[in-house]
Amino acid sequence: MAYNFKEIEKKWQDKWYKEGTFNASTDYTNPKKWYGLIEFPYPSGQGLHVGHPRSYTALDIIARKRRMQGYNVLFPIGFDAFGLPAENFAIKNHIHPRITTEKNIAHFTEQLKSIGFSFDWSREINTTDPNYYKWTQWIFIQLFKHGLAYKATMPINFCTGCKVGLANEEVVNGVCERCGSPVIQKEKSEWMLKITEYAQRLIDDLDDIDFLEKIKIQQRNWIGRSEGAEVKFQITGTSDNLEVYTTRPDTLFGATYMVIAPEHKLIEKYADRITNMPEIEEYKRQASLKSDFERAEINKDKTGVEIKGITAINPLTKKEIPVWISDYVLSTYGTGAIMAVPAHDERDYEFAQKFNLPIVQVLDDGQSLVKDGAMVGDGIHINSGFLDGLNKEDAIDKVNKYLEDNNIGKKKVNYKLRDWVFSRQRYWGEPIPMVYCEHCGWQPIPEEELPLKLPEVEDFEPGENGESPLAKMEDWIKTTCPVCGKEARRETDTMPQWAGSSWYFLRYMDPHNNNALASKQALEYWSPVDWYNGGMEHTTLHLLYSRFWHKFLYDIGVVPTKEPYQKRTSHGMILGDNGEKMSKSKGNVINPDDIVNEFGADTFRVYEMFMGPFDQSAAWSMDSIRGCLKFLDRVWNMQTMLVEGDTYSKETESMMHKAIKKVTNDIEEMKFNTCVSTFMTMVNEFYKLKRINKAEFKTFLTLLNPFAPHITEELNKLAGFENDISTYNWPKYDEAKTIDDTIEIPVQVNGKLKATINVLRDTDESSVKIAVYDNTSVQNAVKDKQIVKEIYVKNKIYNIVVK
RNA sequence: GCAGAUGUGGCGAAACUGGCAGACGCACAGGACUUAAAAUCCUGCGGGACUAACCUCCCGUGCCGGUUCGAUUCCGGCCAUCUGCACCA
């Protein structure tokens, strides 16, 4: 008898969503609160991906468990709906992104509801809703007022064919993915956010929060703090300096040439002294075709051009050294210029070899001089004047002191983290609420005027020079200066999609508030997010951006906590059945609707939890999902073996307590796959016994409920229990009943298993020894051998070492 | 290139702080039920040697080496695969 999941699932979903069963309470008196957060989806035209439910089911399980444990649970959902795909679709098909977005959200909503997540739908948010982005704009204005938003000229990817700024993703092998025209780096004035000002705090405060260690490591590496020094090299024949940043100022005596990034301003400044300008211009043009990433990647073979007519002076050796430009030096890191120490840096070594530049060794590791590569380890200083004979640390201290005393440099902490480029030359994003006045400069619009609504346009094509489509809306652009009242012009760029997702978790706490992004009480009660689960791919961007915004909001007194998320975990990707990432072009996409139709939501959920370790990627398998349907069928058929009983039977008591303990703990550790194994083992056991009593059934259904909420509620009802499982308390276990009285002890001889013996728990060694040597297998294994040593680990193992 | 991860049967995997490798599931094989098939239920299932069968023995957690009574687990060195790299979300 197979169970009718279609009817059952529909019935319970209708009940939950009609009654608001899982809505968070606004009664803030319950001191036990739990806020679980999943990354809200981008409502793409393709619909829900089978990867979404993996993360959602996981936190849904935890949320359902927490409710049964007496918590007031906030488990919200919304849509991150601004973004490129809707806009590109609009350009192609002339359909307003708002319309596509609405349609997609409706589809997503239906799909999410069909899987039975216990979301609080009354708090649904949408980043494209003016009532939402009003507050995104408000936060931007606060950032501006506190000096954390500024304008700077930055390069963007520009398609020479479409005349449009492109996302990195839209650039494939240096050409536009749509039209195939070459993409160049074009300078553009952009809004920037000073995330770098928070770099140190973003590192330090990781110590107080419960993020997976690999996430913390990745964030620290991304922020990339390094300690070093800034050193001035005099430009020969001028009073001007070329400044570099180095983490190894102690190797300064080995700096035999300098390299600056192609974009470095020195070139313009000394254009009249440079004698090979055309060559340099050509090199710069070539470099502008590559992104930073390509430069680093394709840079197996170093390229560069010497700047003729300019040299610099090594401040320690006083020698005149050449200055080169090369794209292995990035303008975005440090000062955009380096001192090259070819004897002790791989890249410098390669470069020096190729262009025949002098290599001076200043570190001696005691064994080898430079042979076929740079010696990058730490050695004792040689050829280094006053640093000779010192080790790395002492030399750094000494040289730093010397640099400071002589005003040629100073200690400096540097970060790889760069400021956040916040402008997009696009239509489908939050308008940046700024106006430019000839007299007053950039000014935010008055806060009473928020939201600054995205105006209706007819044409989604970008402007001639890659401006946002808003740049063509003269009527909208023309405005008055909020300070002096004279004519002013609006910013026409919009915000990146990261903006709306940097604070959405705050809005869920109080989503309909018109006077603040959320009320003080709501923020006080629900903050911080107790558990945030999402993909590893968001570790360095979204997660850092939102931590940055949150810290800023904390600084200005808007939010009560320093950190937005107390705990962060991550799920692995779901791959196609061929082990590759799902994509239309590979034809390996699995549609969640098909799965729900064919197997039901409960099977879908159980399968996604069972398919492998939660934090690792897993390939989809249609065979395995059938196994999960079979498991639920077996669960369904257990109602035919139901017998009376209000306590666990003797045969199952130990198993029941162990299972409650295991499931209770494994859910907390996100070991959902072993929870499902436990359920399967229990079912196998009840089938062997050919009966299950009511007490056992009730506990079993309660444990399984977070994983398979529909079938368990239905069985609970059919078994005649009065209330819904959603109102139950989470089952409790008795520790004493999870401990077995007798234990199987493996006996090894030289580390190889020879026998197992049964002893009472905590039996002392001498009694165990008697039992061990009583065993014939053991006797045979040690016969004619000399016993060297015996190791007994209580209740664990007995190992005999023989010769 | 930089950063993070992963590697265990035919397949997905399990193994709590170093202690019986392969729980649970899939696939496969055999049996029961059935006129038959499907479904369901029961049993077996890492590889090899020996055996009528049991027993027994050897090998086995990507590769090489180390620590240890004992290593999937710890250490060193390799190899392979996956993910991210700042305008995709």
Image: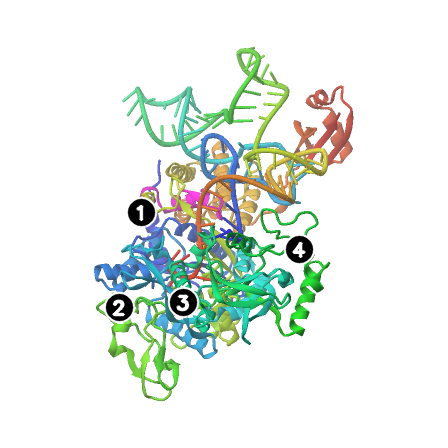
| Quadrant for the C terminus of chain A in the image | top right
Q: Find out whether the residues at labels 4 and 1 contact each other: C-beta distance under 8 Å.
A: no
Chain designation of label 4:
A
Tell me the quarter of the picture where residue A468 sits.
bottom left
What residue is pinned by disc 4? A363
A592 lies above or below A94: above
Give the colouring mode of the picture. rainbow
Real-space Cα separation, disc 4 to disc 1, in angstroms: 55 Å
**Dot placed on the residue nearer the N-terminal end, 2 or 3:** 2
Real-space Cα separation, disc 4 to disc 3, in angstroms: 48 Å
Give the residues drawn in magenta, as a range.
A594-619
Real-space Cα separation, disc 2 to disc 3, in angstroms: 26 Å
Q: Nearer the viewer, mark 4 or mark 2?
A: 4
Does the magenta-highlighted stretch encompass residue A598? yes
Asked if residue A552 can be seen in this view, the reply is: yes
Q: Nearer the viewer, mark 4 or mark 3?
A: 4
B27 lies above or below A717: above
Q: Are marks 4 and 3 on the same chain?
A: yes
Residue A464 badge: 2
Tell me the quarter of the picture where residue A395 sits.
bottom right
Tell me the quarter of the picture where residue A476 sits.
bottom left
Q: Are marks 1 and 3 on the same chain?
A: yes
What residue is pinned by disc 1? A584
Q: Position of residue A790 (x, y in %)?
A: 76, 31
